[in-house]
Structures are given as structure tokens and as C-alpha cells.
Amino acid sequence: MLPTPEEKHKIQEATICNPYLPLGSAEQFFMMLSSISELPARLKLWIFKLDYENMEKTDSITRVSKVDFEELSNNIAKIEVDCKESWDHLKAIVKHDGPTQIKLNVFQ
């Protein structure tokens, strides 16, 4: 669950109104999450990476066993869509992270 802008704003207001009252662990965690640029894109890239690794393992098993070509075709189509979306997420992350090595690699 990601913090909404409204939740972030309320926590910030509470901090301003009560500067000597420390935030609870949940509020601290929400503020930490909200400070990460392009967090949804980063999480989607992470999920894609994990899914891709699992798909590779599944595909290697499929090659050894009886092949269901329809399922294989669906898996390849899903990987293609996920890969294109991941590329868009990566571009968004690079845009907000500034000049890093990954930015140089992405646009070469």
C-alpha cells in the first residue's frame, strides 16, 4: 500500500503542528516511502524482474516436457507487453534520478 498525497499532507501537517511529538512507525514508514522517486515504477520493474526469472525457469521446463504452444505463445506475448511497460517505467525513473550511469546506458 502506497501513501496517497492526502495522507502525506496530513502527516506533514501533524508534524508541523506537533514538532516535539515523534511520528509513529507507520507514519515514518509512509514518509520514507513517499520520499522515493517513481516508487510505483520501481516496484513494477522489480515485479517484472521476478516474473521474468520465473518465466525463464518455466520455459526451460516446458522445453523438456510436452509443449503447449498456445500457453507458450501467451507467455511470450505477456513477456513482450511487460518488457515494453518496464522500459517505460525505467525511463520515468531515470528522468527523476538525474544524470546517473543507468541514464547513460538507457539512451545509448
Image (cartoon, rainbow, N blue to C red):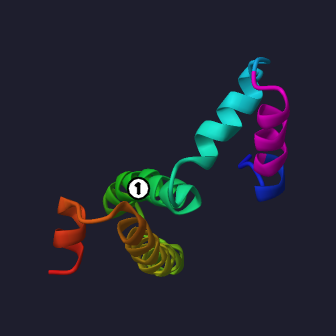
Mark 1 closeness class: few <14, some 14–19, many ≥20 residues within 10 Å: some
Q: Element under label 1?
A: helix
Is residue 80 a member of the stretch shown in magenta? no
Residue at image location 51% in from the left, 75% down from the top = 78
Judge whether 103 appears above or below 17 on screen. below
Q: Provide residue 20's location: percent of width, then percent of height.
A: 76, 18
Q: Is 94 or 44 nearer to us in this picture?
A: 94
Residue at image location 53% in from the left, 73% down from the top = 71
Residue at image location 66% in from the left, 32% down from the top = 29
Q: Is 79 or 70 nearer to us in this picture?
A: 79
Residue at image location 76% in from the left, 25% down from the top = 19
Is residue 10 a member of the stretch shown in magenta? yes
Q: Overall secondary structure of the magenta stretch?
A: helix
Q: Amino acid at mark 1?
A: Lys
Circle 1 residue: 49
Q: Is residue 106 left or right of residue 43?
A: left
Q: Provide residue 2's location: percent of width, then percent of height.
A: 71, 49
- Viewport quadrant of the C terminus: bottom left
Q: Provide residue 4's location: percent of width, then percent of height.
A: 78, 55
Q: Is residue 14 left or right of residue 51?
A: right
Q: Provide residue 25's location: percent of width, then percent of height.
A: 72, 21
Q: Is residue 42 left or right of residue 100?
A: right
The boundaries of the magenta stretch are: 8-19
